[in-house]
Every structure is written in structure tokens, then in C-alpha cells.
């Protein structure tokens, strides 16, 4: 099947602001899945990440996908390939595959669109999260489960603890 045939077979995707599967990510934050790998034919995986102050990721890489952040609201500090950058609403960051990165939410809340291209990380996120129930606001952070999912599903390789002095 050529790219034209594959693209033609995909259904259009339209989701309103509140639409999409809502999942509690064990690393902290609520994911609202906007476009899954299956829906895009593996081209990409797009989700919104709603987080609160202090949410931090370990230093990690995505070996098979580029990760793009678009900050919709709030402010995050990004450690990208050894340098720190402060990103606020309207800012974008692209971590090409294999480039070490981490982030820390510094504002009271933040909302980030996360795009993985090509798709390929979704199995990691499925296994490192759970579907949210009605009225659920958050859940327990469980970094051991995040690490287990990374080891089991690929998509992410954890290199070490968060590289931010104030996150320890």
C-alpha cells in the first residue's frame, strides 16, 4: 500500500477542547488523547498534558520518535541536551529522537500539547497510565510503574533522575 492509499483510508479526526480519552499518567498529570497512533496510521501521537506545579520528568530520551511540546498555558523549565530553557504560553520545544531532555512545571498549573512523530510511544503511555473515572482530579505518582512501562514497551529510555536542583 502506498502513502496515498494509506492516507485515504484514514478517517478525519475532529475533537472539541474537552474531547479525547482522559488518562491519569503515573508520572503525574492528566493526559487528554487528541489523536492516537491508530487514528493517524502511525504518523503521530498527540495528547494534551494538564499538570500542576512541581511535576517533573526524569532525564530521558525517545529513541524512535521526535517529541514536540507546545506550551498552551503556564510555564515549564526544560532541560534539553544539557541546557535549560524557560518556556511559557506560546513557546515550542522539539527534542529530536535520542536527545536527552526533562521538564519541570514551575507555574501553579501548565497545559502542554505533546506530539510524538512518528507514533510509536503510545504503548508506553497506555501502560504507564490508567483511564480516569468521572470526577477524578488526579492520582498517585508512581515513577516505578513509569520505569517498568518504559522497560517493557520501549518508546522511552530513562537516563537518570530529574536534572533540576530544585526538583530533588
Image (cartoon, grey):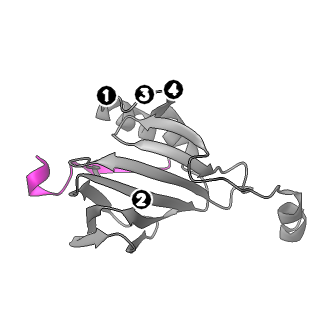
Q: Residue at x 24, y 55 (%)?
A: 104
Mark 1 or 2, nearer chain start: 2
Secondary structure under the numbered disc 2 in the rendered image: strand
Q: Which marked residue is nearer to the observer: mark 2 or mark 3?
A: 3
Q: Say which element carries label 3.
A: loop
Q: Residue at x 72, y 48 (%)?
A: 38
Q: Which mark is residue 136?
A: 3
**In the rendering, which numbered label is found on residue 134?**
4
Disc 4 + disc 2, Cβ < 8 Å: no
Q: Considering the numbered disc 4 on the image, is that residue within a helix, a strand or a loop?
A: loop
Q: Nearer the viewer, mark 4 or mark 1?
A: 4
Q: Which mark is residue 112?
A: 2
Residue 166 colored magenta? Answer: yes
**Chain part drawn in magenta:** 155-168
Asked whether, in this view, residue 127 is left or right of residue 6, the answer is left
Residue in the image at 40% along x and 74% along y:
90
Spatial CA span between label 2 and label 3: 20 Å
Residue in the image at 79% along x and 58% along y: 12
- Label 4 and label 2: CA atoms lie apart by 22 Å
Q: Residues within 10 Å of mark 4 (few under 14, many from 20)?
A: few
Counting other residues with Cα less than 10 Å from the Cα at mark 1, is it few (<14), some (14-19), or many (20 or more)? few
What residue would you read off at disc 1?
A: 140
Q: Nearer the viewer, residue 102 or 73?
A: 73
Amino acid at each position: 500500500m502506498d502513502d496515498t492509499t494509506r492516507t485515504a483510508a484514514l478517517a478525519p479526526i475532529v475533537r472539541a477542547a474537552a474531547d479525547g480519552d482522559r488518562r491519569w499518567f503515573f508520572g503525574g498529570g492528566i493526559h487528554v488523547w487528541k489523536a492516537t497512533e491508530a487514528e493517524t496510521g502511525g504518523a503521530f501521537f498527540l495528547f494534551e498534558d494538564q499538570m500542576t506545579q512541581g511535576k517533573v520528568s526524569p532525564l530521558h530520551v525517545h529513541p524512535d520518535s521526535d517529541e514536540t511540546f507546545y506550551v498552551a498555558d503556564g510555564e515549564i523549565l526544560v532541560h534539553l541536551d544539557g541546557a535549560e530553557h524557560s518556556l511559557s504560553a506560546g513557546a515550542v520545544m522539539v527534542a529530536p529522537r535520542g536527545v536527552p531532555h526533562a521538564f519541570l512545571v514551575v507555574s501553579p498549573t501548565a497545559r502542554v500539547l505533546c506530539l510524538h512523530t512518528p507514533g510509536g510511544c503510545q504503548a508506553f503511555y497506555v501502560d504507564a497510565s490508567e483511564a480516569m473515572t468521572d470526577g477524578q482530579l488526579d492520582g498517585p505518582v508512581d515513577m516505578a510503574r513509569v520505569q517498568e512501562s518504559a522497560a517493557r514497551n520501549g518508546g522511552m529510555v530513562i537516563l537518570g533522575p530529574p536534572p533540576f536542583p530544585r526538583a530533588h
